[in-house]
Image: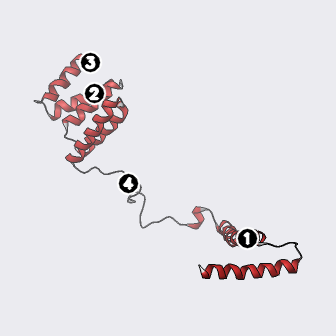
Amino acid sequence: MRVFVEVNAGLDRKLRYLIAKLNIGSYNSIVTRVLSFVFLSTMLFAATFPSRAQQSSQKQPPAAQQPPNETNPPEEDESVAPKKYPLDPLESDRNIKVGNFYWHKGDYRGALGRYEEASKYNPNSAEAFFKIGEAEMKLKNKDAAKLAFQRVIRLAPNSKLAEESKKKLGSKG
């Protein structure tokens, strides 16, 4: 605390001397604080403003500034590459559960997105394709629903889901 008071006292003396020399008028501690604030904010602005001006004057069009990176062409660039879906039945089941959550909330489009994600993580999941078919039917996309139900029958022909799919295809067609 002592250092802070001494530094401010030294600044006070300098400002008091400056004000007396400029004949500004009456002086008190409030005037010192106001002038200190104005002076410091002006200095901060002046310190940052030229650097901004220099940056804007140095900017060039992106094509001229950076040549294309040939070491990482677009087809090999991972940031541009499509998302990879390794075989992951656990992630598939998780997406089905999240899709069911959306389904029960009445968000059929959200559920469909999750079911499709599940089918990408496990392309042999009859449950995922059955859920896709149901969601497509709710969204009135009958052709897409038909394809999904046919895929269920092809993946698991003797399952309960296949029987349900056959019923849905029969009632649809």
- Asked if the residue at tag 4 contacts the one at tag 1, i.e. Cβ–Cβ closer than 8 Å, the answer is no
Q: CA distance from mark 1 to mark 4?
A: 58 Å
Q: Earlier in the sequence, mark 1 or mark 2?
A: 1
Q: Give residue 79's position: percent from left, percent from top.
A: 41, 57
Kind of residue indicated by mark 1: Arg
Q: Which residue is the extreme one toward the left?
A: 158
Kind of residue indicated by mark 2: Glu
Q: In this rendering, would 15 be left or right of 8?
A: right
* Residue 134 numbered tag: 2
Residue located 58% across and 67% down the image? 65
In this rendering, the label closer to the viewer, 1 or 4 = 1
- Asked if the residue at tag 4 contacts the one at tag 3, i.e. Cβ–Cβ closer than 8 Å, the answer is no
Kind of residue indicated by mark 3: Lys
Q: CA distance from mark 3 to mark 4?
A: 39 Å
Kind of residue indicated by mark 4: Ala
- Compared with 171, 7 (above or below) is below
In this rendering, the label closer to the viewer, 3 or 1 = 1
Pick the front one: 156 or 75? 156
Element type at mark 4: loop
* Residue 172 numbered tag: 3
Residue 163 appears in the rendering: yes
